[in-house]
Image: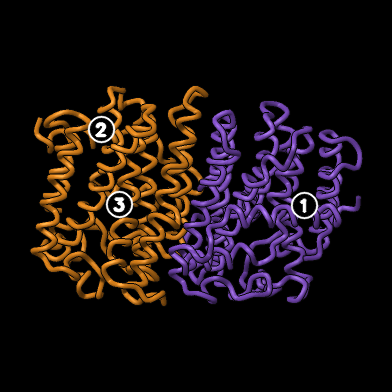
Chain colours: A orange, B purple
Amino acid sequence: MIVEELLSRERAVVEVALDRVLPSAQAWPDRLHQAMVYAVKAGGKRVRPILARLACATTGHDPDAITEAACGLELIHTYSLVHDDLPALDDDVLRRGRPTVHVQFDEATAILVGDALLTEGLLVLACRPFGDEWAPRRARATALVAEAVSSRGMVGGQMEDLEATGQVRGSDRDPEQRLQRIHRHKTGCLLQASVELGAVLAGVTGAEQERFARFGERLGLAFQVADDVLDATASAAELGKSPGKDAAAGKLTYVTLYGLDSARTLLAELEEQMVALAEDLEGADGPLAGLARYVARRRS
Amino acid sequence: MIVEELLSRERAVVEVALDRVLPSAQAWPDRLHQAMVYAVKAGGKRVRPILARLACATTGHDPDAITEAACGLELIHTYSLVHDDLPALDDDVLRRGRPTVHVQFDEATAILVGDALLTEGLLVLACRPFGDEWAPRRARATALVAEAVSSRGMVGGQMEDLEATGQVRGSDRDPEQRLQRIHRHKTGCLLQASVELGAVLAGVTGAEQERFARFGERLGLAFQVADDVLDATASAAELGKSPGKDAAAGKLTYVTLYGLDSARTLLAELEEQMVALAEDLEGADGPLAGLARYVARRRS
């Protein structure tokens, strides 16, 4: 199966499960729930839950058993976007071609939407799959993802990014070290945790979990470098958001620090590494390798 | 032992454990961690972890086994204060006699501090007490607290509160129903969950957990009504924050809706109910009853 077909089938499975884990937009507090649904159902690529499902399938376990848990990742990812877009942070008005939550609703609602999505995402991970026999894996899974998005992970990367643009006063730091920290944490930690989640819920531990983690780590870096390249090269229609913002905002990205050619070379290297790591896990030409290629070459 | 002595001893135990669960202010990302520590170590009363410890002790189990887990409640409570204080929400500049986080640091940092504290609080609950034998209780505890602070709980109450002041556009609603929703959810849900957490980590389930929940529910309501009374009657020095803000901001509180006398009468009734429920759980004159009296009569 070509990877686009696999991804579109996977995405359809995730969309249905997302509707099951999201609170109803009609239930109290309706305005908040409407805004949560607006944020989540904006048509993302659902890469994180798909990664978890593919990693789970690689171990020989049924990925359908963990789809709802995997949706917790998407709620958490969406929270991070809603808060990043706020006026006090990146001040973005457009996301996936639509007004951001604080523009469509208001700033207070957007703050609470992020808070509620983060809570709901970790709640989903603490509860699903249902059943006491899953409890030890659920506890590990919740801790794994919470650690990945903590101050030592995703939120720390966001803080470093704000310091890099001078939006908040921070410690002086070498730009290369700073960029590495931003790349590693801001997007990388949650993507790595997504791969690990699928493995952990399938019962994988120790050295085998470590192999999934290494694949996820490379994938996270590739994802971020591809993002930097896209911001510098794609059109607004392709991106669904304003391009060229990084350079204009003085953002520290792989492209602004090393240039476009270096970024493309790095992406090709990462693709090779990811495919090798994926082969180790699933044999030749498996779905993880397909997804790795897709991430390294994505155009939107 | 008089209740003030019990509370001060309990508080000292919680402070030490808080230092163990908080990230070091020296570790990367330092600015974020400094702000997290600033927010948490501002000298709160630590009512929520103390409630969990007392509920646990009531069942005959060692409360010291769950102190770190109970600290997760305090991190989550602090997150809610930091976000409530933001300019887009309550716009408070003073909290416990000190500048709020967004004043002392900046708005972006305050948003991330709240995000990181919520994450850390749920992470602590997913991890502690350590050991696979605790995993089923930990999974239940994490889900219990996450549900309490979700859009259907604490965050929903905050949303309703913002709608009540007209800060955000919301559905028309009867003021009495609105007030009940605010009181039940904004403070009540997490206080009830704090009592239940101590019981759940001690292995309590079913009808017995329900009795703890009912005590916690009354306590949450009493806490909020006492807060409304204090805002209308206490001085800034007693409160550590600006008093009289509720009336000035057109906030819907028990005092602004029913008047000070009715609020005091309700508090006395709640105290009686709480003491009766506490006797059921711990016999006459136990620590839960003492805490209930303290909450209903508090002056700051």
Above or below B13: residue B38: below
Identify the image quadrant of residue A229: bottom left
Q: Which mark is residue A188?
A: 3
Front: mark 3 or 2 = 3
Q: In front: B173, or A171?
A: A171
Q: Residue at x 44, y 63 (%)?
A: B28
Q: Amino acid at mark 2?
A: Leu
Q: In front: B196, or A104?
A: B196
Q: In 3D space, how far apart are the residues under numbered discs 1 and 2 (Cα atoms)?
A: 48 Å
Q: Quadrant of the N terminus of chain A?
A: top left
Classify mark 1: residues with Cα within 10 Å, few (<14), some (14-19) or many (20+): some
Residue where numbered disc 1 is placed: B10
Identify the image quadrant of residue A60: top left
Residue where numbered disc 2 is placed: A54
Label 3: which secondary element: helix
Q: Position of residue A35 (x, y in %)?
A: 39, 53
Q: Is there one chain holding both mark 1 and mark 2?
A: no
Q: Position of residue B115 (x, y in %)?
A: 47, 57
Is residue A264 among what the camera can see?
A: yes
Q: Residue at x 68, y 49 (%)?
A: B49
